[in-house]
Amino acid sequence: MKQEKVSLAEEDEKYLQDLLSKGSLNARVYKRAFGLLELGKGKTYQEVSKLLNMSYPTIHGWGKKYNLAGLAFLKDKPRTGRPSGLTGEQKAKITALACSTPPEGYARWSLRILADRVVELNYVEEISHTEVGRILKKMNCSLIEKDNGV
């Protein structure tokens, strides 16, 4: 079996060392940078996989990606996912509604009641209670009543 090597360019090695010395890195980026430096020092994929407690195919993939794209592979690519589709104004209205007095007969808002009321008030055409929960979570808004110590 042919042993593949990773040879780091001098400026790439210096960049990785500087990156690792900063101390405030995402764990994935740190592991990739450290692993790549170790590969550049001549260690095998097997040795680096044991050192980082990661699988051999992962480390081998890093080597391949570096040889193809350079240091660009250190950062994660944007993940797919459906965008919210709600405007800031709509999110603000939902948050304001959650902060208002709950409907008669209820002590507080629930996510399902909020979602139904948002559609009823024509803020949006449709919305799930889970989306309402995500919006409120991002706005750091809680549906639990605050106790004023009275």
Image: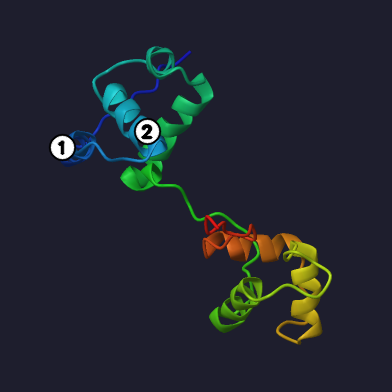
Reply above or below: 105 against 78.
Answer: below
Quadrant of the rendered image containing residue 24: top left
Left or right of residue 144: residue 21: left
User: Could you give the CA–CA distance between mark 1 and mark 2, rounded to whole angstroms?
Assistant: 15 Å
The residue that appears at 45% across and 47% down in the rendered structure is 76
Task: Give amino acid for label 1.
Answer: Lys
Can the viewer see residue 6 in this picture?
Answer: no
Left or right of residue 142: residue 43: left
Proximity of marks 1 and 2: CB atoms separated by less than 8 Å: no
25 or 48, nearer to the observer: 25
Q: Residue furthest bottom?
A: 122
Residue 147 marker:
none
Reply above or below: 94 against 75.
Answer: below
Q: Quadrant of the C terminus?
A: bottom right
**Are there few (<14), some (14-19), or many (20+) residues within 10 Å of tag 1?**
few
Percent of width and height locating residue 148: 53, 59
77 or 88, nearer to the observer: 88
Percent of width and height locating residue 117: 78, 77
Q: How is the image coloured?
A: rainbow
Task: Give amino acid for label 2.
Answer: Arg
Give the number of marks. Answer: 2
Residue 14 marker:
1
SS type, badge 1 = helix
Reply above or below: 118 against 46.
Answer: below
Percent of width and height locating residue 32: 37, 33
Quadrant of the rendered image containing residue 18: top left
First reached walking from the N terminus: tag 1 or tag 2: 1
Left or right of residue 31: residue 88: right
Can the viewer see residue 52 in this picture?
Answer: yes
The residue that mark 2 highlights is: 32
**Are there few (<14), some (14-19), or many (20+) residues within 10 Å of tag 2?**
many
SS type, badge 2 = helix
